[in-house]
Image (cartoon, rainbow, N blue to C red):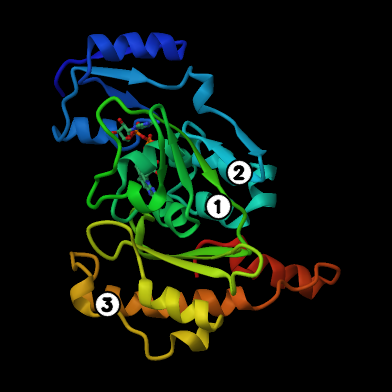
Amino acid sequence: MQDFAYVRPQSMQALGRLLQAQPEARFLAGGQSLLAAMRLGLSAPAQLIDLQDLPELHGIAVRDKGLHIGAMQTHASIAQSPAVRAFCPMLAALAAGIADQQVRSVGTLGGALAHNDPAGCWPAGVLALGATLLTSQRQIAADDFFQGLFCTALRPGELLLAVRFEPALAAAYYKQEQAASRFALLGVAVARLPVARGAGQARVRVALTGLGPGVRRWAAAEQALAAQWGAAALDGLQLPATAALGDVHAGADYRAHLAGVLCRRLVSRLSQPPAPVNTRHGLLQRFLHPLFRSSP
Ligand SMILES: Cc1cc2nc3c(=O)[nH]c(=O)nc-3n(C[C@H](O)[C@H](O)[C@H](O)COP(=O)(O)OP(=O)(O)OC[C@H]3O[C@@H](n4cnc5c(N)ncnc54)[C@H](O)[C@@H]3O)c2cc1C
């Protein structure tokens, strides 16, 4: 690994000064992806700016009817947050299903989104929920943020501060795991979002991860589910193999097929009302409900 400088600013002003002096510096969150890339020689920044002491990047709060999660919140802290669990159980379940406890304790929401791994879980959840990414320079809609393989709308020196989620009527994430890493071999996130009063039925957004070079929405499934909510709406709907990429873990045709299977399974479970919690059977059913789980 090439030599590099390490700095740990204590305020946004100090961070600004560091960026002015060294515009090519890279932000360091938990280092779960960046340090691995540096070790492999894929990245060689001259300076790393550690973000952990900046309070502006921490915190989880419900404000103005939206859930704000700071970019430096770890997956583990999101999974355990009562505010996240109450506002959108899908986000807590998604975070709990990432990798292992070690990665979850160090990896961050902001790092995962800025890295935009094509098999990452967070890009799918954030895209399906139509979240807004708040940066040091502007607000970016999730639809504009993810720009293909490890690419995002972030400009050099632009810092992701937090993500804002609007309330969803229902949402869930479901992934077939790649056994070694627990990244998504194929992951599906579905969200039903409210529309303005009198504007018709709920909006439905479907995001797929692990399918190709980056997270993407599945427009045909969204239209079918918006017209008729339920797994039957997806009958006969299939992605072509050309929409997917194959690799050593799975072929393109398998991934495309899996997208349809998982989406149908997810919508089917999501359509069932959560079982009552006042019986032993109800408790078990509720535990098994996809809102509380991230994997089949
Ligand atoms: C073994 C393993 C298994 C994993 N499994 C999964 C999985 O199943 N699902 C999943 O979604 N993820 C998975 N991950 C990824 C993990 O979730 C990390 O969040 C991800 O690697 C990013 O790491 P990090 O947060 O430490 O960011 P870093 O590695 O520190 O940074 C990653 C990139 O983001 C940039 N960056 C970081 N923070 C910011 C910011 N606030 N603003 C702008 N740019 C920023 C950095 O400069 C760098 O380019 C896995 C990782 C490992 C190592």
Q: Is residue 58 above or below residue 19?
A: below
- Residue 47 at x, y percent in the picture: 24, 16
Q: Which residue is mark 3?
A: 254
Asked if disc 2 and disc 1 are in contact, CB closer than 8 Å, the reply is: yes
Q: Which mark is residue 138?
A: none
Give the mark nearest the N terminus, 3 or 2.
Answer: 2
- Residue 97 at x, y percent in the picture: 49, 54
Ligand 1 resides in the quarter of the picture at top left
Any part of residue 251 in sight: no
Instruction: Say which amino acid is labelled 2.
Output: Leu
Instruction: Say which amino acid is labelled 1.
Output: Leu
Q: Nearer the viewer, mark 2 or mark 1?
A: 2
Q: Residue at x 75, y 73 (%)?
A: 275
- Residue 19 at x, y percent in the picture: 29, 15
Q: Is residue 223 above or below residue 33?
A: below
Q: Is residue 68 above or below residue 225?
A: above
Residue 60 relative to residue 43: left or right: right
The answer for how far apart the CA atoms under marks 3 and 1 are is: 27 Å
Q: Which residue is mark 2?
A: 67
Label 3 crowd (10 A; few <14 / some 14-19 / many >=20): some
Q: Of helix, strand and loop, which one carries label 1?
A: helix
Give the mark nearest the N terminus, 3 or 1.
Answer: 1
The answer for how far apart the CA atoms under marks 2 and 1 are is: 11 Å
Any part of residue 148 in sight: yes
Asked if disc 3 and disc 1 are in contact, CB closer than 8 Å, the reply is: no
